[in-house]
Image (tube, rainbow, N blue to C red):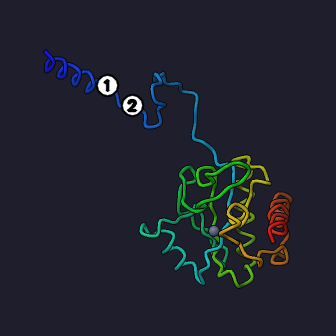
């Protein structure tokens, strides 16, 4: 009798469609078509502390290192994308901002190739600001949500370094780019 029940139960389970992986325990699955992918609402800047982009790229794509970012920008302004913006890249680590304790889940991570002891190349900052302004427009990310790693993990991180400065850029910037740079530099002054 019990054995018959078990067989019936197994057959019933096998007939079920697979459950969604993010289902709440005990909730009845009643699918709605009204959704799309979650949107990042923060951007976090880093420096690689490397002296060339090839070394940084090797680290950021090495499965053993378990560290990655969505974008890597070289000193020459070349922008490389390493992770889909919809995916959660591993760049922020233990961090906090405005009550948010999982910045990796909510952000785009951008690595600037820089040792930490040198000025940032103008071509690199211009490429960065172009990318930031594009992300701000596309995802409607508020300017105050553009942050440095040093802002969200002040006990562990100082990147991008004190060399990150407006004086690095002589090129004419679009108003949106100027506003983002201003926001980033204001926070830098506050954390120094
Ligand atoms: Zn960092």
CB within 8 Å, label 2 to label 1: yes
Residue hosting label 2: 19
Query: Could you tell me how far apart the alpha carbons at marks 2 and 1 are, in whole angstroms?
Result: 8 Å
Tell me: 58 left or right of 141: left
Tell me: 142 left or right of 88: right
**Picture disc at residue 55:** none
At which x and y percent is residue 182? 85, 64
At which x and y percent is residue 105? 59, 50
**Dot 2: few (<14), some (14–19), or many (≥20) neighbours within 10 Å?**
few
Q: For disc 1, does the CB lie below 8 Å from ligand 1?
A: no
The image shows residue 151, relative to residue 11, as above or below, that is below
| Residue drawn 85% across the image and 77% down it | 167
Mark 2 lies on a secondary structure that is loop
The image shows residue 22, relative to residue 108, as above or below, that is above
Residue hosting label 1: 16
Task: Give the quadrant of the C terminus.
Answer: bottom right
At which x and y percent is residue 76? 66, 78
Tell me: 39 left or right of 66: right
Task: Give the quadrant of the N terminus.
Answer: top left
Q: Quadrant of ligand 1?
A: bottom right
At which x and y percent is residue 52? 58, 82
| Residue drawn 45% across the image and 25% down it | 26
| Total marks placed | 2
Q: For disc 2, does the CB lie below 8 Å from ligand 1?
A: no
């Amino acid at each position: 009798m019990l054995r018959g029940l078990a067989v019936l139960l197994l057959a019933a389970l096998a007939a079920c469609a697979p459950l969604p992986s993010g289902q709440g325990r005990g909730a009845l699955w009643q699918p709605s078509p009204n959704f799309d992918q979650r949107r990042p609402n923060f951007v976090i800047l880093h420096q690689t502390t490397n002296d060339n982009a090839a070394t940084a790229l090797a680290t950021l794509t090495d499965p053993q290192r378990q560290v990655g970012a969505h974008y890597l920008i070289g000193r020459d302004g070349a922008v490389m994308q390493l992770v889909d913006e919809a995916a959660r890249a591993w760049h922020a680590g233990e961090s906090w901002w405005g009550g948010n304790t999982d910045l990796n889940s909510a952000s785009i991570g951008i690595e600037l190739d820089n040792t930490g002891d040198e000025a940032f190349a103008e071509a690199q900052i211009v490429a960065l600001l172009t990318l930031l302004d594009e992300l701000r427009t596309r995802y409607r990310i508020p300017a105050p949500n553009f942050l440095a790693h040093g802002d969200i993990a002040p006990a562990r991180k100082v990147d991008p370094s004190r060399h990150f400065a407006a004086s690095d850029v002589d090129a004419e910037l679009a108003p949106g780019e100027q506003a983002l740079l201003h926001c980033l530099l204001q926070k830098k002054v506050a954390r120094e």
